Image (spheres, rainbow, N blue to C red):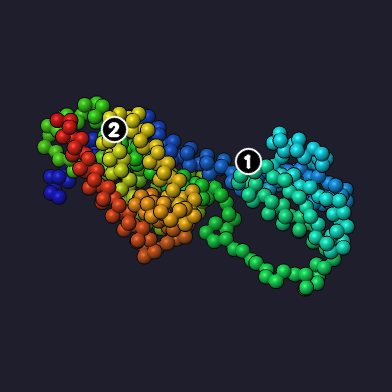
């Protein structure tokens, strides 16, 4: 690549940045995507059991049963209400409580005699995240509450054969906001890179600038490369600012790994995903068509890249297909660096795969871009 070619790419990229600076809608989108769109889901998307509504059916009317009701405390549960057995279906049908705990008759008597009581937990499974975790929390609370009354609590024969001690690494308090915030940044990088580059191409076509560029001594490679570096650097700067100001500053997520390493991996990823945005723009003729095409692509990348659901839990064929999508390797790379303080030696396979996919995307996109320019002549 000659000095003249590099000069053309640089000046065309500056022109792209100036065009972007005059587009208030895209500027607002950039600001929104890396601020409000990161902060709000991390703080508002509650997937843990927090302030869950709960009711107690006290069929035993004993001291132990009352202690169980009093043990259901914030922040896991709202103050437990006491209802009658005949009201269970009524309150559950109306969605008043997520959990109803039915304490059976002879609850205290069974505990005193060493007989495990049968406690029923009715769960509103429409609250999926809380319904999945809540029963185990309730079970632990009941066991801790009645343990002092258990006659065999000091008998080694009644102890479990294996006592587990769980330690959570990389997120010791298991705060869901940590995961959501970083995952939002990763997803928003993808959507913004695709839409900025796609909009740059379509803006040239809709404003008639393509014809002006074609009469200049410029090659398709120079035009495409300029759009990639100009829009890529905007996404890079916005993502790094969001990582420091929103994720680390406002939300308080500690960044364990190397920021320069993450920035380098982000550049490699942008090389591929910006080429994807240009490729999608060459298929359609207008921004509405581009939106209809790009959104399904982004949703697939977001849901199936391993950020929302572990890749190992997907069908084997789908796992193999997603290996050809750059976001799969970027999600793995980002989580390894930002959460687990991975070194370059640990993440180089993901970087290499992103580069190969980006090179393949760029070659195909360049051929599509040449055809689009040839059709515009």
Foreground pick, 109 / 271: 109
Picture coordinates of residue 168, whole percent (x, y): 57, 60
Q: Which mark is residue 126?
A: 1
Secondary element under disc 1, as helix, strand or loop, is loop
Foreground pick, 123 / 43: 123
Foreground pick, 344 / 127: 127
State whether residue 264 appears in this view.
no
Picture coordinates of residue 26, whole percent (x, y): 36, 32
Outermost bottom residue: 156
**Horizontal side of residue 211 vs 184, given as left or right:** left
5 is higher (above) or lower (below) than 312? above
| Residue at position x 12%, y 32% in the image | 215
Q: Which mark is residue 284?
A: 2
Marked residue nearer the N-terminal end (2 or 1): 1
Secondary element under disc 2, as helix, strand or loop, is loop
> Dividing the picture into quarters, in which one does residue 85 lie?
top right
């Amino acid at each position: 690549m000659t000095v003249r070619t590099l000069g053309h790419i640089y000046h065309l990229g500056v022109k792209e940045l100036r065009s972007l600076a005059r587009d208030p809608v895209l500027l607002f989108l950039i600001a929104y995507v890396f601020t409000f769109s990161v902060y709000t889901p991390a703080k508002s998307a509650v997937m843990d059991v927090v302030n869950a509504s709960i009711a107690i059916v006290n069929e035993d009317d004993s001291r132990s049963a009352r202690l169980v009701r009093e043990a259901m405390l914030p922040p896991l549960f709202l103050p437990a209400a006491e209802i009658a057995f005949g009201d269970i279906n009524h309150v559950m049908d109306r969605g008043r409580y997520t959990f109803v705990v039915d304490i059976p008759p002879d609850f205290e008597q069974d505990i005193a005699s060493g007989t495990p009581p049968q406690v029923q937990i009715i769960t509103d499974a429409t609250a999926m995240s809380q319904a999945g975790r809540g029963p185990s929390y309730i079970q632990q609370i009941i066991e801790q509450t009645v343990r002092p009354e258990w006659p065999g609590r000091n008998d080694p024969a009644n102890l479990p054969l294996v006592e587990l001690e769980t330690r959570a690494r990389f997120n010791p308090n298991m705060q869901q906001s940590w995961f959501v915030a970083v995952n939002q940044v990763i997803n928003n990088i993808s959507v913004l890179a695709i839409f900025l580059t796609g909009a740059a191409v379509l803006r040239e076509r809709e404003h008639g600038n393509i014809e002006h560029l074609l009469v200049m001594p410029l090659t398709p490679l120079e035009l495409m490369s300029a759009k990639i570096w100009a829009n890529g650097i905007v996404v890079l700067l916005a993502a790094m600012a969001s990582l420091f100001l929103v994720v680390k500053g406002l939300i308080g997520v500690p960044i364990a790994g190397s920021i320069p390493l993450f920035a380098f991996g982000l550049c490699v990823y942008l090389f591929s995903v910006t080429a994807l945005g240009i490729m999608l723009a060459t298929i359609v003729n207008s921004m509405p068509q581009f939106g209809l095409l790009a959104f399904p692509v982004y949703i697939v990348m977001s849901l199936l890249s391993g950020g929302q659901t572990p890749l190992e839990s997907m069908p084997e064929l789908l796992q193999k297909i997603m290996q050809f999508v750059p976001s799969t390797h970027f999600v793995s790379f980002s989580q390894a660096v930002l959460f687990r303080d991975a070194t370059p030696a640990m993440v180089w396979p993901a970087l290499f795969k992103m580069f190969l996919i980006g090179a393949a995307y760029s070659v195909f996109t360049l051929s599509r871009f040449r055809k689009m320019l040839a059709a515009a002549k």
